[in-house]
Image: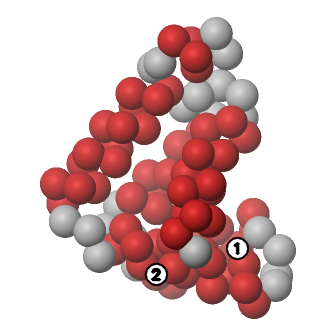
Amino acid sequence: MKLLRVLVLIALPFSCFAGSGCPLLEELVNKTVDSQVSMDEYQNLVRPYYTSHPDSEEAMRQLKQCFLSQSSETLCNVAELLNMIYESKWCVMF
């Protein structure tokens, strides 16, 4: 499951081919990292983007729970890391 979380976070920036130039991607990432967003609100937000298979729903629940259990400092570091990825020389060309 940890590998799934890492793959989801790695794949998200490439889904729009524009780093953070994709508003849907930015909203999903921000809601995932935001500890103020409840589990129910998050599930309703991401439900249109995955299959209705029970394992998919559980994976999204675990992804959000992973971020809910982190400290504020860690969440800030994740947001900073994402910005560094978006602004990297590999994403600039997109």
Q: Residue at x 73, y 85 (%)?
A: 55
Q: Nearer the viewer, residue 61 or 47?
A: 61
Nearest the camera: 3 or 40? 3
Q: Is residue 91 above or below residue 40?
A: above
**Vertical side of 54 occupied by 16: above or below:** above
Neighbourhood count class around disc 2 (C-alpha, 10 Å): few under 14, some 14–19, many 20 upward: some
**Residue 43 visible to the viewer:** no
Query: What residue is at 62 percent from the left and 54 percent from the top?
Result: 7
Q: Is the residue marked by circle 1 packed among few (<14), some (14-19), or many (20+) residues within 10 Å? A: few
Residue 33, position as x, y percentages in the image: 39, 59
Q: Residue at x 62, y 65 (%)?
A: 4
Residue 17 located left or right of residue 78: right
- In the rendered image, which residue does mark 1 sit on? 47
Would you say 23 lies left or right of 32 here? right
Q: Name the residue type under label 2.
A: Met
- Identified at 34% across, 44% down, the residue is 79
How much space separates mark 2 and mark 1, taking CA atoms?
12 Å
Q: Secondary structure at mark 2?
A: helix
Image location of residue 71, percent across then percent down:
19, 65
Secondary-structure class at tag 1: helix
> Which of the 4 image quadrants contains residue 6?
bottom right
Q: Position of residue 15 (x, y in %)?
A: 72, 40
* Quarter holding residue 83: top left
**Residue contact at pointers 2 and 1, CB within 8 angstroms:** no
Q: Is residue 13 above or below residue 27?
A: above
Number of the label disc, if any, that sits on residue 39: 2
Is residue 49 toward the left or the right of residue 88 in the image? right
Question: Taking 43 as reference, is 75 left or right?
Answer: left
